[in-house]
């Protein structure tokens, strides 16, 4: 499982970011755990993923900061889904997904998968291969923020 975790963390690196804008990206991944205290109240904890097993819910966080001398215009971040993880939620209305390796993009609800018999079915979270954020507004000098998505270990 340690090898799978290392692969998972390596796969978190964004595949594409417009480097000319000099926006720095810092990637983190957490395991989402639900605990119940003595009073019966549930709490959601984000923990460092020391060991992950199938069914664990993961939260991927991409923190960005414009380290350049000018606003970062038309900034795009594209992140492949790690092979060991099924997409669960983008958590952000700006996020688009791809189900074909990054050739076409859209909301998951708008995408369809071509079947071998020529029919099409609605795309499902397990079909997602990439996630992308395309910023509509420039990121100001020194501007920061976070992008996130959730997945489940296969």
Image: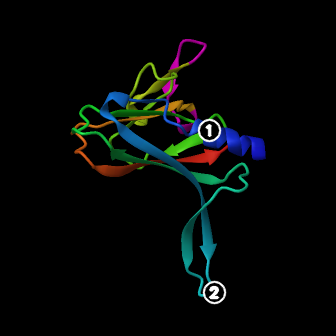
Q: Quadrant of the C terminus?
A: top right
Task: Using the image as rendered, state which of residue 29 and residue 139 is in the foreground.
Answer: 139
**Above or below for 144 versus 97:** below
Q: Is residue 70 above or below residue 2?
A: above
Instruction: Tell me: 54 left or right of 57.
Output: right
Label 1, label 2: how far apart the Cα atoms are = 38 Å
Q: Which mark is residue 10?
A: 1
User: Residue at left 76%, top 41%?
Assistant: 3
Residue at image point 29% right, 39% down? 68
Quarter-of-image position of residue 83: top right
Residue density around tag 2, few if under 14, some if 14–19, many if 20 or more, within 10 Å: few
Q: Residue at x 22, y 45 (%)?
A: 140
Bin the neighbour count of mark 1 within 10 Å (Cα to Cα): few under 14, some 14-19, many 20 and up: few
Residue denoted by label 2: 38
Q: Position of residue 146 (x, y in %)?
A: 39, 51
Report the side of 146 relative to 122 (left or right): left
């Amino acid at each position: 499982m340690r090898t799978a975790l290392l692969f998972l963390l390596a796969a978190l690196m964004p595949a594409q970011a417009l480097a000319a804008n000099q926006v720095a990206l810092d990637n983190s991944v957490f395991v989402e755990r639900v605990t119940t205290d003595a009073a019966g109240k549930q709490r959601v904890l984000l923990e460092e993923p020391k060991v992950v097993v199938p069914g664990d819910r993961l939260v991927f966080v991409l923190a960005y900061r414009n380290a350049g001398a000018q606003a970062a215009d038309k900034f795009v971040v594209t992140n492949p889904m790690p092979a060991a993880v099924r997409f669960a939620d983008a958590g952000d209305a700006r996020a688009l997904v791809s189900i074909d390796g990054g050739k076409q993009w859209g909301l998951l609800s708008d995408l369809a998968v071509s079947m071998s018999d020529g029919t099409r079915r609605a795309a499902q979270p397990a079909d997602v291969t990439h996630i992308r954020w395309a910023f509509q507004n420039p990121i100001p000098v020194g501007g920061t923020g976070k992008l996130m998505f959730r997945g489940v270990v296969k």
